Amino acid sequence: MHDTRLIVGILLHRPDGSFIWFLNPLKSMRYILWHNYKWIILKAILAVLLILLIGLFFYSMPGYMVKKMLGT
């Protein structure tokens, strides 16, 4: 559907989606960032999750080692 406006006797035909990027900047940023940096973003998320998993392992390891040594 096209937006038709009459301004000072001039009939303008504008597509509905011509300024959609201006009205929704988050979608534009997502499109720009995701399409250009998709693999970097995925690798960064994977690295952060792996670091958190290793950190959780070292955080909980001493407690489990003490339990195992004491036989409880």
Image (tube, grey):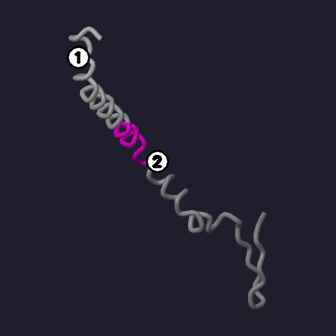
The amino acid beneath tag 2 is Trp
- Mark found first going from the N terminus, 2 or 1: 2
Is label 2 in a helix, a strand or a loop?
helix
- Residue 3 on the magenta segment: no
Magenta region: 34-45
Mark identifier at residue 65: 1
Residue visible at 56% across and 68% down in the picture = 22
Position of residue 43 measured from the top left corner of the image (x, y, whole percent): 36, 36
Residue visible at 76% across and 71% down in the picture = 3
Asked if 47 appears above or below 2 in the picture, the reply is above
Main SS, magenta residues: helix
Asked which quadrant contains residue 44, the reply is top left
- Residue 38 on the magenta segment: yes
Position of residue 68 measured from the top left corner of the image (x, y, whole percent): 25, 11
- In-image side of 67 versus 11 (left or right): left
Mark identifier at residue 34: 2
Q: Nearer the viewer, mark 2 or mark 1?
A: 1
